[in-house]
Image (cartoon, rainbow, N blue to C red):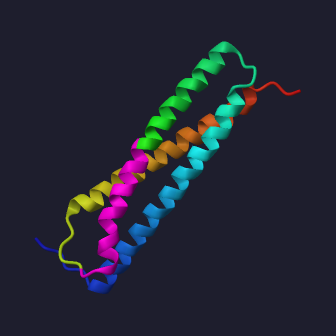
Amino acid sequence: MTTTIEDNALSAELQELYLITKQWSSDLQFISDESDILKKLSKKPLEPEVKKKHALLFSSLEQQLVKLKLKVIHLQKRLEPLTYGPIKEIKLSLIEEQQLLKSEMEEILLTFHATKNELPGHIPHK
């Protein structure tokens, strides 16, 4: 079964997907920058188990960020030519990739916010 979509509607949807991936790139850069700040905060005197826990969290977060940035860039490169050129064929894998990335973005944002909200409670105030 083939579904036909008007060229204008498809073009608008593809442009929206492209803009979403651009926003994801910005979000990932923000998380990276904020993580650097939080890592510096975690270097302050902390209990050893708290320090170890946050070191593991930041290491995991950094690994996720690197992988996710590459996936977002890959999707952007696939979407970009579709936003300005004639659309010949779009495979379902493009939508699947976008949905998977959406889930991964939500997951990394939740992880980042949980880490961000937990750390200040462990930092001694002077």
Residue 53: quadrant of the picture = top right
Residue at left 55%, top 31%? 58
Residue 110: quadrant of the picture = top right
Residue 44: quadrant of the picture = top right
Residue at left 52%, top 50%? 28
Task: Characterize the magenta stretch by its predominant secondary structure.
Answer: helix
Query: Above or below — where is 95 with respect to 124?
Result: below
Report the residue that reaches farthest toward the top: 48
Asked if residue 52 lies in the magenta stretch, the reply is no
Is 43 on the left-hand or right-hand side of 52?
Answer: right
Q: What stretch is highlighted in magenta?
A: 67-86
Q: What x and y, as percent, mark residue 3?
A: 18, 75
Residue placed most toward the observer, 100 or 73: 73
Residue at left 68%, top 28%? 42
Q: What x and y, as percent, mark residue 34?
A: 64, 44
Is 67 on the left-hand or right-hand side of 29?
Answer: left
* Residue 55 shows in the view: yes
Is 9 on the left-hand or right-hand side of 53?
Answer: left
Asked if residue 84 lies in the magenta stretch, the reply is yes
Report the residue that reaches farthest toward the right: 126
Q: What x and y, as percent, mark residue 25?
A: 48, 57
Query: Above or below — where is 29 with respect to 11?
Result: above
